[in-house]
Image: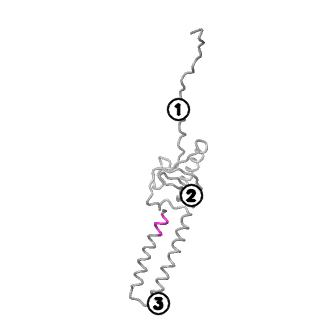
């Protein structure tokens, strides 16, 4: 199940409680029917709003449940004055997610530099503490990890040498 299912289910239960209160309230029948109709029309509207939000990048400041020490940056787009849009793969999360950071020129330059380094190296790009605001400028937020060392070569046994029987 996705977060959409849980959020929608919680909203539906809360709406059911409100609809029950509406039906049992000491009001005229017309007022009760209008309130019940509005409650029932709210459900598809709420589902459509949640489904639409799934396709939009989430502001990093609104990531309340997920924590991560680092994330792999799969892609990024810089829109000057608007934001830094990132496609992140977070360890422990099955699918990649889209996020938007507030525009920061220094952070944008850091991302571009790290992207260039990643292209020249192993092609991977990492981001430290993606969901925590930091005033620490000593460590870069984006970096290209060093290329891993190749695996050690296998040591083969020495070749067998043929010795003719006459010489033996």
Q: List the residue tagged with mark 3.
A: 30
Which residue position is annotated with label 1?
A: 152
* Nearest-to-viewer mark from 1 and 2: 1
Query: Which mark is first along the chain, 2 or 3?
Result: 3
Q: Position of residue 102 (x, y in %)?
A: 52, 59
Label whose residue precedes the other's in the sequence (1 or 2): 2
Residue 77: image quadrant is bottom right
Where does label 2 land, which residue? 85
Q: Which residues are magenta?
A: 3-8
Residue at the image position 51 percent from the left and 54 percent from the top: 94
Farthest residue in the top direction?
A: 167
The percent coordinates of residue 118 (x first, y second) are 58, 45
Secondary structure mostly seen in magenta is helix
Q: Secondary structure at mark 2?
A: strand
- Disc 2 residue crowd, few under 14, some 14–19, many 20+, Cα 10 Å: many
Colour scheme of the picture: one colour
In the rendered view, would you say 6 is above or below 124? Answer: below
Relative height, residue 58 to residue 153 (above, below): below
Alpha-carbon distance for marks 1 and 2? Answer: 39 Å
Q: Please tell me which of labels 1 and 3 falls first in the chain.
A: 3
User: Marks 1 and 3, how far apart in space?
Assistant: 80 Å
Q: Residue furthest front?
A: 165
108 left or right of 36 in image = right
Q: CA distance from mark 3 to mark 2?
A: 49 Å
């Amino acid at each position: 199940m996705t977060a959409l299912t849980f959020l929608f289910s919680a909203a539906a239960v809360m709406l059911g409680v409100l609809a029950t209160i509406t039906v049992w309230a000491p009001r005229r029948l017309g007022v009760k029917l209008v309130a019940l109709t509005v409650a029932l029309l709210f459900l598809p509207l709420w589902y459509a709003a949640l489904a639409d939000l799934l396709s939009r990048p989430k502001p990093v400041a609104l990531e309340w449940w997920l924590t991560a020490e680092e994330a792999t940056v799969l892609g990024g787009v810089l829109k000057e004055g608007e934001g830094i849009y990132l496609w992140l793969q977070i360890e422990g999360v099955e699918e990649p997610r889209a996020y938007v950071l507030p525009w920061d020129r220094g952070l944008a330059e850091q991302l571009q530099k790290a992207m260039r380094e990643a292209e020249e190296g192993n092609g991977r790009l990492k981001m430290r503490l993606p969901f925590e605001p930091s005033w620490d400028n000593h460590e870069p937020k984006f970096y290209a990890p060093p290329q891993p060392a190749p695996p050690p070569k296998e040591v083969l046994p020495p070749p067998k040498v043929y010795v003719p029987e006459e010489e033996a």
